[in-house]
Amino acid sequence: MASERMTGAEIVMKALADLGVDVVFGYPGGAVLPIYDALFKQNHIRHILVRQEGGAVHAAEGYARSTGKIGVVLVTSGPGATNAVTGLTDALMDSVPIVCLTGQVPTHLIGNDAFQECDTTGITRPCTKHNYLVKDVQDLGRVLHEAFYVAGSGRPGPVVVDLPKDVQFAEGDYEAPRSAVHKTYKPRVKGDRGSIEKAVELLSGAKKPIIYAGGGVINAGDKGSQLLTQLVRMTGYPCTLTLMGLGAFPASDDQFLGMLGMHGTYEANMAMHGCDVMLCVGARFDDRVTGRLDAFAPGAKKIHIDIDPSSINKNVRVDVPIVGDVAYVLEDLIKLWKSSQSGVDGKALDTWWEQIAAWRAVKSLDFKQSDTVIKPQHAIRRLYEATKGRETYITTEVGQHQMWAAQHFPFDEPKHWMTSGGLGTMGYGLPAAVGVQLAHPDALVVDIAGEASTMMNIQELSTAMQYRAKIKVFILNNQYMGMVRQWQELLHGGRYSETYSEALPDFVKLAEAFGAVGLRAEKPDQLDNVIAEMIATDNAVIADICVDPAENCFPMIPSGAAHNDMLLGPEDENESSVSKDGMVLV
Amino acid sequence: MENLDSERHTIAVLVDNEPGVLARVIGLFSGRGYNIESLTVSTVSEDKTMSRITIVTLGTPMIIEQIKAQLDRLVPVSDVHDLTDEGPHIEREVALIKLLAKGPERRESLRIADIFRARVADTTVSSFVFMVTGTQKKIDAFTELMRSLGEVEVARSGVVAIARGSEVL
């Protein structure tokens, strides 16, 4: 293929088109004017104008996670880039593939404290998988293709490409590279055969096995979830998922124990604690999952499949590490299991399931429904019932509502649940919902939100209106930053320092001010009607669900405690249950 | 986490010689709270496209393993070698030590320099600059002796290291 001569800005547009990009989330400014001019002159790529750059990255994350494609962001220099930092860090923590193009002052002004200059590559170095400053237009095409390859391969993550304005104007040659081979970056996808053999041996000899899977399964593509499901059903072993992994295995399956971790189910955490063989698939033993490390699954042989070697033996020492892409490794593991005629210890497994049934009988997610006030868990369950049979995507903000959504809204398919897990970014859900809705215009997209989080990126409702993204913001309004208040109750003597949501807007009027529809439910008997109306409305909606302000999120492993040391409900709650060591943990 | 004693490891990191690569490595250490005892870097390939960073670090075996995995994860890093783990290797350092001394101290400093095979790289009537190479311990010892003779200024290169034997990275 012959190379073509064009300006840097045109190269950007051409490369994005060649890379199959159809949507870019962005915000213009002085240092990206040439790119916006090139954007104006083409019609392959749709630009979504957000209201703040942070919203652009979250929208791109929602787009990426609900499609499996790479989310693309375009922002200007200085404040454009710094506003994007939270989203980039969020994408890094949750392994979301993002390419963020940032404008930069012209190369001769770099380092001069020019207007809207910041050290973008310096600032984003620790919060990206990789970043580039392109100083020569001749490098631009190659760098853009490389950026997409790095963002999407291996353990996915955000990549920043910083583009000085003079490079955007300069003329250079563009040629789409033929291969994506990188000189130094070579992620390993195929697992080591010997280790997989060892894993099969351990698994087939297990008496109390558990399969603990996470977001890596979803990042491995649809095949990852299919293979995980196949493995779980083939072995008859119990399966639990992390917050990021929800949907990787069908929640409606009897072998699913629910989410594990701090607000996971009793049966999932007790099974993790009591298991003798643990297969961790694409999860990273996060502190929210493990609880107290020295009491984590003390009797278990642990097998860990992860594409990122640095995730292995980081928090928890494992017996059989397998570096590779979940889909590749599971495929080999299943083949090997079948060919080696590995059986399971049926008798031991029956006993194990009996034990699990006893833990399940505790019904740790139960709550007391009330006739006078809407319980937040009830609201989510009713929402789920009303959305059954529809193509529904859920995003969330961060806090109690997020945990209740994870507990009470079951997912049978991957890529339908978008939440900020690692970074815990309040304000993620609304812009993410916009990104999801633009990728799936006909689907129902609901942001399960809290009133405090909603206020963090409310401006993006305007973006939703501009592009007719009919997102539904389902606010569980308890007038508190509920999760923080819950911790204050548990750890700080109930002194609710600054956690009351003072001076809240009228969310119904707020929705109307944006041109959206505002609905409110104050009593349990109004709930179903409001949900039905929200779903039926052919417009963006804010549904203000006034829920019990005092409700707390249970079950809970208090910080610094072990899996078998859960608080099951308010009657368990007392200050003495948290150790001094636990107090310092977040 | 296992509470094992810290070990000292010397790690050679081969990197693509692109801008910001050293900042990435240093940022990784500070960001994740790892120790750097010494760090040296220089271009090593004939075409100047690759650099070699030698890092001396302290940590428990689990942390050392993490450090290597985290280094290897950086996009421009091509190879990570734990020289301490991989077998016998040589570690050397260069130091330039300026000593202000007169009279018998000045003569004594030359005798000690001779014992340590240090060379005089610069001189005035009231000062010497000695250049000494060797292991960290040797340079520590030499520096201490010089301190006892007068006011000193020390510049040290940090450790460079290479495996013994005929294998080439």
Image (cartoon, rainbow, N blue to C red):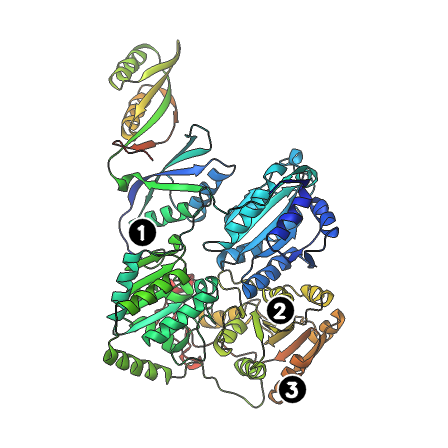
Left or right, residue B126 beside residue A510: left
Q: Residue at x 45, y 70 (%)?
A: A248
Left or right, residue A190 beside residue A471: left
Q: CA distance from mark 3 to mark 2?
A: 25 Å
Residue lying farthest to the front in this orientation: A1
Q: CA distance from mark 1 to mark 3?
A: 56 Å
Residue behind mark 3: A529
- Placement of the N terminus of chain A among the 4 image quadrants: top right
Q: Is residue A519 visible?
A: yes
Q: Is residue A265 visible?
A: no
Left or right, residue A85 beside residue A295: right
Residue behind mark 2: A440
Secondary structure beneath label 3: helix
Residue behind mark 1: B62
Q: Could you tell me the amino acid type at mark 3?
A: Asn
Give the chain letter at badge 3.
A
Q: Could you tell me the amino acid type at mark 1?
A: Met
Quarter where residue A11 is shown: top right
Quarter where residue A387 is shown: bottom right
Q: CA distance from mark 1 to mark 2?
A: 44 Å
Foreground label between 3 and 2: 2
- Mark 3 or 2 closer to N-term? 2
Q: Residue at x 39, y 77 (%)?
A: A257
> Crowding near pointer 2: few (<14 within 10 Å), some, many (20+)?
some
- Placement of the C terminus of chain A among the 4 image quadrants: bottom left
Residues behind callouts 1 and 2 on a single chain: no
Give the chain letter at badge 1.
B
Foreground label between 1 and 2: 2
